[in-house]
Image (cartoon, helix red, strand yellow):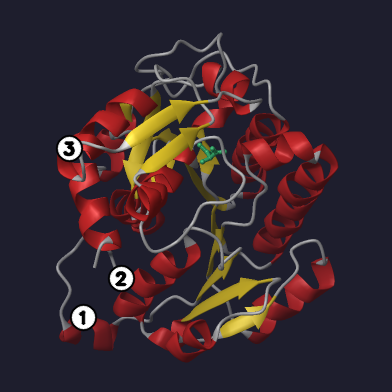
Amino acid sequence: HYLDFSSKRNTSTLKNVKAPRVLITGGLGQLGMAFARNLRAIYGSDNVILSDIKQPSDDVRSLGPYIYLDILNYALMEKAVEECRIDWVIHLSAVLSALGEKNPKLALDVNINGFQNILEVSKEHNLRLLTPSTMGVFSVHSGKTNTPDFAVMRPDTIYGISKIHMELMGEYYNKKYNLDFRSLRYPGIISADSQPGGGTTDYAVDIFHSAIKTNSYSCFLKKDTSLAMMYLDDCIEGTLKLLTAPEESLKQRVYNINAITFSPEELAQEIKKQWSPDFKIEYKPDFRQHIADTWPNSLDDSNARRDWNFDPKIRSTEQLVSIMLSKLNK
Ligand code: AKB
């Protein structure tokens, strides 16, 4: 009996319900700290354990428990799960699309072998396992706009291939062993306080830092490359809704989520409007253009809305640019 994230919180409920103990892997990437902050506010600092293979800053250490954890080391992971008495895992460790194309071996290792370890530990210890997937599982054969949950999937990247593997293995363990596996397909995630790393949608974060510093940006995608995107807060809130949804409400184990669509040119126009009319952008497409050309510009998320009430707040490029500029320009 765990707390329901979507229900109204009050301290009397908190006293009567056992808080889950949550492990976050890949915790020092783009999303980890935001998940930790939100989960700690609900379940208490000590119940949320952040982990990674990097040295944490003093700031990270001061905010709650942090452990060194290499997901490629099964024994270490099992020890962490036992010693920290973990109930739920949010598995964020992954090599993203662009970095994966530069180093397919690393992507296979982390995204397939690392995931297999997490999956096995979760099954053995009866954990709830949430691992994000990506719009990168889709391809030119899936349809560009309003791509449905169940579409033809023939991804061109090792990232997409390894994430389909993850989705299918999670579903398989759910059916075969009753593992409580949950996943959702992220669009490009835009955040102000943390940097993405190694993705194809990274331009949509870099552009803000560059606009503020130099009033210009050199973009690695063509100006009309429309992609699906989402602001960090909507990603975190949506993921926590899925994480805490009653199991019987889930009609499937992997869901699309969707929020905003824009191209580099549309984003630059909005930055010009809200930041400076002199903002300059040039387009120098590189190998990431091909990846972007195979991805959707919007996803059909009606099943996520129906089953666990997914409801993102930031729905326009205008709102997104306004939030990013106000956060970064403080
Ligand atoms: C990437 O660009 O690789 C990621 C993603 C969309 O999964 N941001």
Taking the spot 51% from the left edge, 52% from the top edge, the residue there is 196
Q: Is residue 258 left or right of residue 105?
A: left
Q: Residue 251: which numbered mark, if any?
A: none
Q: Secondary structure at mark 3?
A: helix
Q: CA distance from mark 1 to mark 3?
A: 39 Å
- Tag on residue 3? 2
Q: Along the horizontal axis of the image, is 306 left or right of 246?
A: left
Disc 1 crowd rating (10 Å Cα; few below 14, some 14-19, many 20+) is few
Residue mark closest to the camera, 2 vs 3: 3
To which quarter of the image does residue 28 belong?
bottom right
Quadrant in the picture for residue 19: bottom left
173 and 276: which is toward the camera: 276
**Residue 318, numbered label:** 3
Residue drawn at (30%, 71%), measured in percent from left and top? 3
Foreground residue among 296 and 15: 296
Q: Earlier in the sequence, mark 2 or mark 1?
A: 2
Please state, as top left, top right, bottom left or bottom right, where the C terminus lies in the image.
bottom left
Q: Is mark 1 within 8 Å of ligand 1?
A: no
Q: Are marks 2 and 1 in contact (CB under 8 Å)?
A: yes
Three-letter amino acid code at the position of disc 1: Thr
Image coordinates of residue 83 in percent, x first then y, are: 67, 86
Percent position of residue 78, x then y: 75, 73
Q: Which mark is residue 13?
A: 1
